Image (cartoon, rainbow, N blue to C red):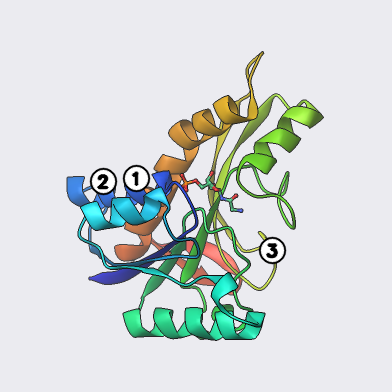
Amino acid sequence: MLRVVVCVSGGGTNLQAIIDGVKEGSITGAELVGVISNNPGVKSLERAANAGIPAFVVRPKDFAVRDDFHKAFMDKLAELKPDLIVLAGFLVRIPEEMCKVYPGKIINIHPSLIPSFCGVGYYGLKVHEKALERGVKITGATVHFVNEGMDEGPIIDQIPVRVLEGDTPEVLQRRVMEEAEWKLLPKAIDDIANGRLVMENGRAVRKA
Ligand code: GAR
């Protein structure tokens, strides 16, 4: 069983899609061993509790310097012994050393078609605000392996989503989640858990 730790910051709809995938059998060979949130009191923690998954809060504010937060976060991860770390709406920049400690073992879901609308300052609803400002007609979501860069890791898969007349950032965010994110992330986990997908030489490689 692949030991999966999910890192979250807020609502946790992607976490829920993963929980449901494991429960309903669209994700096999994976076990959710922990959820780490950087925010207390968020819906994600409730979702973890309802599913009986151990959940932890490691909050930057509780530490005098960033390095101490990073250490506490890395220690919590190490305790959980993950085979795969899923950034599912984790809106905090991860410690640099994390990619060295867990090479090819971290994936992220991003709510745009990378390389559009990604990198520093592009997270959560902001991504959709920028997409609407720019007037794109197609957006979507990307699941990718995580490397040292910001949203620069090898792309695993993408699903395009049409922008519709009158969309607000909230409406577009929901459509991107429903049509793209909640499909891409569980599928990537299932593929990794079943040996169909790995990161090799800086690329996402599919195995027959
Ligand atoms: C999702 O749209 C996810 O793609 C995005 O945050 C949202 C979290 O929603 N992540 C990023 O922007 C990462 N750069 P959720 O808490 O309901 O899953």
Above or below: residue 90 compared with residue 67: above
The crowd level at tag 2 (other Cα within 10 Å; few <14, some 14-19, many 20+) is some
In the rendered image, the quadrant that contains the C terminus is bottom left
Name the residue that disc number 2 marks. 20
Name the residue that disc number 1 marks. 17
In the picture as drawn, the residue positioned furthest to the top comes out as 165
In the rendered image, the quadrant that contains the N terminus is bottom left
Question: Residue 115, percent across and down?
Answer: 72, 49
Residue drawn at point x = 26 percent, y = 46 percent:
20
The earlier-in-sequence mark between 1 and 3 is 1
Q: Kindly identify the amino acid type of the residue bearing the numbered disc 1.
A: Ala
Question: Residue 3, percent across and down?
Answer: 29, 72
Question: Residue 109, percent across and down?
Answer: 52, 52
Of 143 and 5, which appears nearest the observer? 5
Residue drawn at point x = 51 percent, y = 28 percent:
175
The answer to whether the residue bearing label 1 lies less than 8 angstroms from the nearest atom of ligand 1 is: yes
Q: Kindly identify the amino acid type of the residue bearing the numbered disc 2.
A: Asp
Secondary structure beneath disc 1?
helix
Name the residue that disc number 3 marks. 150
Residue drawn at point x = 47 percent, y = 42 percent:
181
Q: Distance between the Cα atoms at labels 2 and 3?
A: 28 Å
Q: Distance between the Cα atoms at labels 1 and 3?
A: 24 Å
Secondary structure beneath disc 3?
loop
Taking the image as drawn, is residue 100 in sight? Answer: no
**Is the C-beta separation of discs 1 and 3 under 8 Å?**
no
Label drawn at residue 129 = none
Left or right of 111, for residue 182 = left
**Is the C-beta separation of discs 2 and 1 under 8 Å?**
yes
Left or right of 122, for residue 22 = left
Q: Kindly identify the amino acid type of the residue bearing the numbered disc 3.
A: Met
Q: How many marks?
A: 3
